[in-house]
Amino acid sequence: MGKDKLRKFRENLTFDCFVQPEFDEVFRRDHPLKGHWHDSFFRNDNPIVLELGCGKGEYTVALAERDPSRNYIGIDIKGARMWRGAKTATERGMRNVGFLRTRIEFINGLFGEGEVSEIWITFPDPQLKTRRAKKRLTSPLFLEYYARLLRADGTIHLKTDSKHLYAYTNEVIRRFGLPCAVSNPDIYGSGYADEVLSVKTAYEQLFLGMGLPITYTRFSLGGRREFPWFDWEEDEKSEKDNEAERGNR
Ligand SMILES: C[S@@+](CC[C@H](N)C(=O)[O-])C[C@H]1O[C@@H](n2cnc3c(N)ncnc32)[C@H](O)[C@@H]1O
């Protein structure tokens, strides 16, 4: 492993905003912060917003700066990427930011029932292969995880360049009859992007450079808790996305 990565891993552990559970703290049991993020971590009652697969945490930091009346937590498994966001939040003395290094699959061991108000999913891996559909962060499997920690009126935001993931998510919304406030296939081309939506992540900048339209979907779970699996006919297509422009991801 590179020296720079090791340095970042070490420095992450010195940041007050950085939480890195041990594997056995989240595997088949609950983390001590579960249900206690308000009182033990943020020390306030403000709503909690998650950014899943946050990478360098651009949304976490930018939204937290714009809205000090909410708490923001960036979640990812890659510590060296998260270091960027955690370092910035530390240097700026931001008290409403946390970074949590974990696999998203363990999220129900980390947050209690209704502890989270909002979820942002920013440029997740689109998981184009049909056999990897369960790994899509808007698959029924993940929606069941979210339903267990999101408030009944909680919102989910998805920003992606992937046409396939955008269409898949819209199909999930349709099948389960979920309330959908926005489904926009090209937020910059249509002039829809406001100040918040115009925050650009590292991957977003890459995709914009390739000329790909950026899509945005905002929906909620409408109090629904169970999301039975379904196979989607469109998954059988071989060319699912703008794969040529996207290159190897
Ligand atoms: C394509 S990158 C996008 C990063 C960032 N949101 C951006 O737009 O620049 C996807 C991120 O999701 C993270 N990720 C993917 N699957 C994950 C999982 N199951 N648990 C935690 N992080 C995951 C990866 O480590 C990676 O940083």
Image (spheres, grey):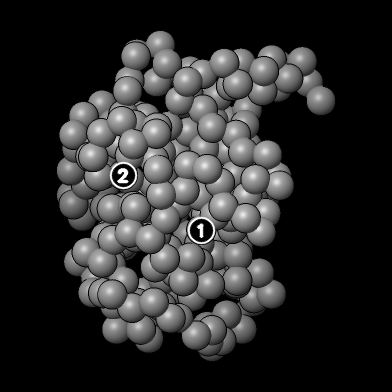
Q: Quadrant of residue 65?
A: top left
Write the residue at 39% across / 77% down.
225
Element at badge 1? helix
Please give the residue where the numbered disc 1 appears in the rendered image. Answer: 108
Compared to 99, does 144 lie above or below? Answer: below
Which one is nearer the viewer's eye here, 243 or 106? 106
The percent position of residue 28, horizontal first and vertical second, equals: 66, 59
Q: Which of marks 2 and 1 is nearer the N terminus?
A: 2
Q: Is residue 6 visible?
A: yes
Apparent side of residue 118 relative to residue 56 in the rendered image (left or right): left
Given the image, on which type of amino acid does mark 1 rest?
A: Asn
The percent position of residue 238, horizontal first and vertical second, equals: 64, 76
Write the residue at 52% across / 37% down.
100
The percent position of residue 11, horizontal first and vertical second, equals: 61, 16
- For disc 2, does the CB lie below 8 Å from ligand 1? no
Please give the residue where the numbered disc 2 appears in the rendered image. Answer: 48
Write the residue at 33% across / 52% down.
116
Q: Can residue 164 be seen in this view?
A: no
- For disc 1, does the CB lie below 8 Å from ligand 1? no
Compared to 225, does 37 lie above or below? Answer: above
* Neighbours of disc 2 within 10 Å: few (<14), some (14-19), many (20+): many
Given the image, on which type of amino acid does mark 2 rest?
A: Ile
Q: In which quarter of the image is residue 77?
A: top right
Q: Which residue lies furthest to the top in this view?
A: 91
